[in-house]
Amino acid sequence: MKRDGIAFWTGAVVFLAAVLVMTQVVGNQYPFFAGYVILQSIALAVAWSILGGYAGYVNFGTSAFYGVGVYASVFLVSAFGAPLPVQILTGAAIGAVMGLALGLLTLRMQGIFFSIATIALTIVIETTVTNWRYVGGAAGIQIQRPAVTPPFDSYVQMLFFVQAVLVVLAVAISRYIHNSWIGRGLQALRDDELAAECTGVPTLRLKLLACVISGALMCAVGAPAAMYLQYADPGSAFNLNYSVTTLAMSLIGGTAHWAGPIIGAILLGTTQQVLTVTISSEVNLLVLGLMLVLFVVGAPEGIVGLIYKLRGNRKEGEK
């Protein structure tokens, strides 16, 4: 294993250990509620970047995958009383199938046409769930949490740790793709898809693979949300804010590196949580818009791109 790989996995273990210790020593439950949302944002942004960042296909279907993950859990709990790991694994499997289907239907489209198709997917699935009475329909459905599993004192603490594990999984997959031939192929088709195809890059297969992995991760991230809120309704689960916010986090952090979406999600997610507590959640969209405009104009390649640019200028100055 290379040195950077050892450093990454050491950091991941330390991060999960810190999260576990936090669940044992912090008595106030609010940090876990807020932390869950931030971790969820990180995982969604990282998952989005696999297709939207590496391949350059701007996907507005995040809310569709997230919502399907939510309602997959609702169905499994209502029908079978399935435990959380089964909910997450089933959500990931459904997301992979959805990603494959979406890819086969839409990935021959490019630019704005692909983005419109992903929005249409959200509308179609939300309409279907709204008319599905078994999972509550338009009125929504209440979810009863099962007994918490030791060593956690509350279910929210457990969900906080589970979401941290999903973050590590999503980042590890994204990092592997970025550093492998898959990432190089996706970058080539993002720069010039026709040229990449002419040089032998299997563009369609790579796009399908990116769509499957991205979809599986998004659905898996959405699966614990039903237990987190103890309630699910189509308007919230399929809210397009998930799509817009996830895209903004990735663009703010930068899509050229696997760490970009993490940085953007931490920055924007933390800011939104602080504003929700101190002012109002209504200002979140305003801050989102301002930050997005600021970075698109001042740092179009995101924070990671800005760091690379500053390093390049510093090296040139030292010569």
Image: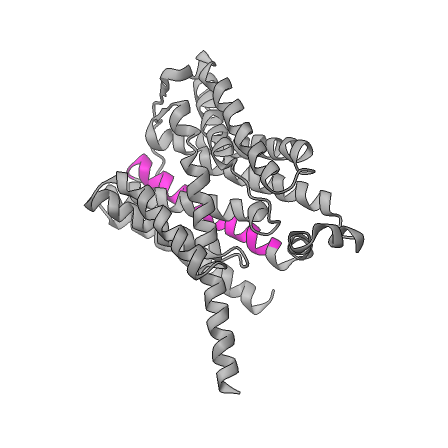
Start and end of the magenta stretch? 153-177
User: Horizontal and vertical percent for residue 130?
Assistant: 45, 17
At horizontal 27% and vertical 42% (from top left) the residue drawn is 283
Query: Which residue sits furthest left?
Result: 278
Is residue 165 within the magenta segment? Answer: yes
Residue 166 visible, this orientation: no
At horizontal 75% and vertical 54% (from top left) the residue drawn is 195
At horizontal 72% and vertical 47% (from top left) the residue drawn is 203
In the image, residue 50 above or below residue 139: below
Quadrant of the rendered image containing residue 233: top left
User: Horizontal and vertical percent for residue 132?
Assistant: 47, 14
- Relative to 87, is 109 on the left or the right? right
**Depth order, front residue of 313/257:** 313
Quadrant of the rendered image containing residue 148: top left
User: Horizontal and vertical percent for residue 310?
Assistant: 46, 72
**Depth order, front residue of 129/117:** 117
Query: Which residue sits furthest top?
Result: 133
User: Horizontal and vertical percent for residue 316?
Assistant: 52, 82
- Relative to 295, is 8 on the left or the right? right
In the image, residue 252 above or below residue 98: below
The image quadrant where one finds the N terminus is bottom right
